[in-house]
Image: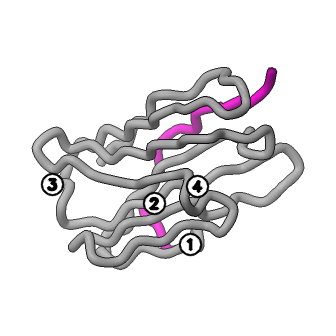
Amino acid sequence: VQLQAFGGGLVQPGGSLRFSCAVSGFALDYYAYGWFRQAPGKEREGVSCLSSDDVTTYYADSVKGRFTISRDNARNTVYLQMNSLKPEDTAVYYCAGDRTGIGGRVPNEYDFWGQGTLVTVSS
């Protein structure tokens, strides 16, 4: 089971980025997925998650209306579209999989993790 995240980089405030999390080793649609981030000196926080049946989604208040989580089962990939980026979005971002299919905002609820990818929002 592997999760590999792509899409980090440097972006100006107000810009957009899209993360991709390529999943291998199991079928995408059985698991819930989440995106987390960790800024320097801060704890890892839940950004967004999506249940296995796509019914339940979660967005942190700080990203509501700006970020969108989605999945493409045919490509075995989970996405996080990030718009209107702010300097406070600067962090290392992680994708994670939860085999219960429920998901959630707490890192301990997830079983598999991808490597982190850095986003820097700065002018």
Earlier-in-chain disc, 2 versus 3: 3
> Which residue was labeled with disc 1?
105
Circle 4 sits on which residue? 36
Reading the image, the residue beneath label 3 is 27
Tell me if label 4 and label 3 are in contact, CB under 8 Å: no
Instruction: Indicate which disc residue 34 carries.
Output: 2
CA gap, disc 1 to disc 3? Answer: 22 Å
Magenta residues (range): 108-123
Secondary structure state at the residue bearing disc 1: loop
Q: How is the image coloured?
A: one colour
Q: Would residue 76 appear left or right of 65 to someone viewing this image?
A: left
In the rendered image, residue 20, in percent from the top left (x then y), is placed at 38, 36
Residue 38 lies left or right of residue 73; in this view the side is right
Crowdedness of circle 1 by 10 Å Cα count: few (<14), some, many (20+)?
A: some
Left or right of 27 on screen, residue 39: right
Q: Are marks 4 and 1 in contact (CB under 8 Å)?
A: no
Q: Are marks 1 and 2 in contact (CB under 8 Å)?
A: yes
Asked if residue 113 lies in the magenta stretch, the reply is yes
Please say if 75 is above or below 109.
above
Name the residue furthest right.
41
Q: Quadrant of residue 9?
A: top right
**Amino acid type of the residue tagged 2 in the rendering:** Gly
Q: Nearer the viewer, residue 118 or 60?
A: 60
Q: Are marks 2 and 4 in contact (CB under 8 Å)?
A: yes
Calculate the distance from the C-alpha at mark 1 to the C-alpha at mark 2: 8 Å
Residue plotted at (58% across, 38% down) = 116
Residue farthest along the left direction in this orientation: 74
Judged from the image, the secondary structure of the residue bearing numbered disc 4 is strand
